[in-house]
Image (spheres, helix red, strand yellow):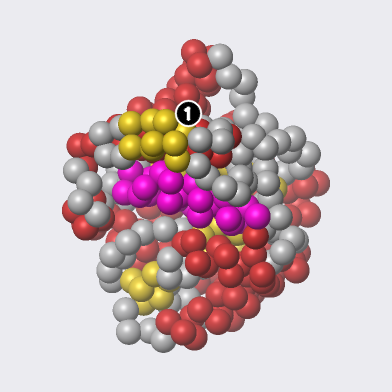
Amino acid sequence: MMVKKFQFGLVVRGQAEHGEDISRRFQETLTFVRLADQLGFDSVTKTAHYSAYPYQMLQLVPMLARFAAEAPRMRLNAGVLLLPLLSPLHVAEEFATLDVITGGKIILGVGLGYRDVEFKAFGVPRAQRVRRFEANLEAIKRLWTEEKVQMKASHFELDDASCLPKPLQRPHPPIWIGANADAAVERAARLGDCWYIGPAIEIAALGRQMDLYRRALDQAGKPFPAELPMRREVFVARTRAEAIRLCAPYLGAKYKAYHSWGQELPDDDSGFDQEFESLIGDRFLIGSPDEVAEQILTIHRQLGVNHLVMSTEWAGMPESLATETIEMIAKELFPRVRQGL
């Protein structure tokens, strides 16, 4: 696809604290998505995990289907589907259907996964996750672009299998590959339409990984992608001190959960086991609109990112605060970034 402007995406987790009224949270989420559409966000991303204790988490595919009705203008991103756990035919047909429902605006974000509880629950040996990921991705691409597919892998067989209808997007919806580890970054260059840069890794470490990504693209004979998305935790307020005070209880709790889940990071990242203000570092985009705009422009210049997928609300955050934040982002941050490009 031809990307003509810097795009702003919004992450919607559909997540609630243990014991919270999930039905109320669901309705708030729909209001949030409708507002994002009205404010001019370009995409909405639904996150995915299974067995997300201590959080309640509404699942990705049904939520994206509902978002298509609530926000007909925005692109919809699966961010990210844990591909080794799933059947490629199931994924191909579900996302072809979503592409039809959205009028050709679906993005398939995929990743390896890293949590033992998920691999065990699906009966997938963790040691097979890379092999299954690559075979599943090949099968999905073939199902989307071929009439019938003959393919046998260790965990499935496609015997004249078909995916009808085909996706509306040609040759298929964009495939964003989430990657933290160096080997996964190289895999994203080889197999994906782009590397979907995750929210957790420090910008300093990403500079080295971007060099790795460019070399891997060259080795694969592929150009630098027209669209390079990055997900980041973003929070704005009148001052940096106020922004930290307001978001710390919710964002800090989220990263304590990530730490307990054992999220994988490159060796040159300082890790999550830190006090909140140290954890921020250059990892999160937090501050006044002027400060955060400059951080975004720096990321764009250094890495080539042109689609920023922003996490701005976390489990337990009051709806009023989440709403005020995305309104300030749209009305004050968007213009500053676009003026600076």
Q: Is 165 a magenta residue?
A: no
- Above or below residue 26? Residue 98 is above
> Could you say where residue 203 lies in the image, as x and y percent from the top left?
48, 38
Q: Give the residues in magenta.
A: 76-100
104 to 207, vertically: above or below: below
Q: Is residue 242 left or right of residue 2?
A: left
Q: Quadrant of residue 223?
A: top right
- Residue 215 x %, y %: 49, 17
Q: Is residue 25 visible?
A: yes
Image quarter (top left, top right, bottom left or bottom right) of the N terminus: top right
Please tell me which residue is depicted at 61% across the width and 24% down the height of the picture: 224
Determine the residue positioned at 36% across, 59% down: 49
Whether residue 306 is situated above or below residue 49 in the rendered picture: above
Closer-to-camera residue (201/173): 173
At label 1, counting other C-alpha atoms closer than 10 Å, the crowd grade (few under 14, some 14-19, many 20 or more) is some
Q: Is residue 287 left or right of residue 8?
A: left
* Mark 1 residue element: helix
**277, 334: nearer the viewer:** 334
Taken as a whole, is the magenta stretch helix, strand or loop? helix
Please name the residue shown 56% across and 33% down the image. 146
The spot of residue 32 in percent (x, y) is 61, 73
Magenta stretch encompasses residue 94: yes
Which residue bears the numbered disc 1?
191
Question: Is residue 188 visible from the viewing direction of this image?
Answer: no
Quarter location, residue 111: top left
